[in-house]
Image: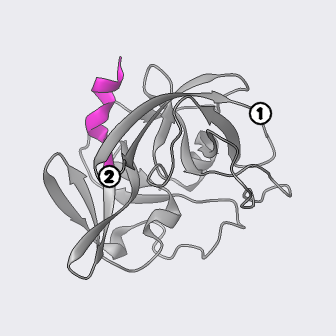
Amino acid sequence: MDDNTFQPYVMPIFRQMGNVRSFAGTAFCIDDYLVTAGHVIDSQQVYYVRNGNDFHVLEHDKWIPRILPADDRLGYDVAFYPVPGLKSPLSLATSDAKRNAHLNVLCWQLKPQELLQVSTQGLVLQDAEEVGYQHISTVEHITHGCSGCPVFDGDGKVLGMITMGRTSVDAKGLAPLPRQMAQNTCWAFKASHIKRFMP
């Protein structure tokens, strides 16, 4: 399968701010859920997902978890929204990516005034078994808006989800602490941890 198969199942999320919808991040479909990074929807505002030219409201009280942490010290940054009957070609992998594994990354980016879907390749830089994240490098530089996007193999098995650009992990079980981001590197929340919190 190629990226064209998966593109309709990776969508931008918008936050309603007054009379304006502001781009907030990326979401993707697996099983009967829309999945994104928890910090993308960390306030009780109105959110929308865009499917083609249609905007669909995402009711705040339907997100799982309903109350998201103010930070990521507990080692998770993921949220789910139930959408029965999605029939997505993306599915959650049964194991995490290994070091030097080649991956696909599909996200939405604001470049500079136009919202575009960006497809690039990634490489797992290290295998940190003790934490929920893996450090990856991407061919194309991705920035704000990639949070919540899937990292997957050629068969559409989701091996992780981009959370943000970070470069170090301080302690076992804790999320990476913010640092100066190295060029074209970011952190992906592992498939095993997505599964851990999946309803």
Q: Can residue 94 be seen from the camera position used here?
A: yes
Question: CA–CA distance between discs 2 and 1?
Answer: 29 Å
Q: Say what amino acid the circle numbered 1 marks.
A: Gln
Part of the protein shown in magenta: 1-11
Residue 11 horizontal/vertical position (percent):
31, 47
The secondary element bearing badge 1 is classed as loop
Examine the rendered structure and indicate whether residue 60 appears above or below residue 72.
below
Which is nearer the eye, 157 or 170? 170
Left or right of 60 on screen, residue 169:
right
Q: Say what amino acid the circle numbered 2 marks.
A: Pro
Q: Can residue 87 be seen from the camera position used here?
A: no
Examine the rendered structure and indicate whether residue 122 appears above or below residue 161.
above
The numbered mark at residue 126 is 1
Q: Quadrant of residue 138?
A: top right
Check disc 2 and report the residue beneath it: 12
Residue 21 horizontal/vertical position (percent):
25, 69
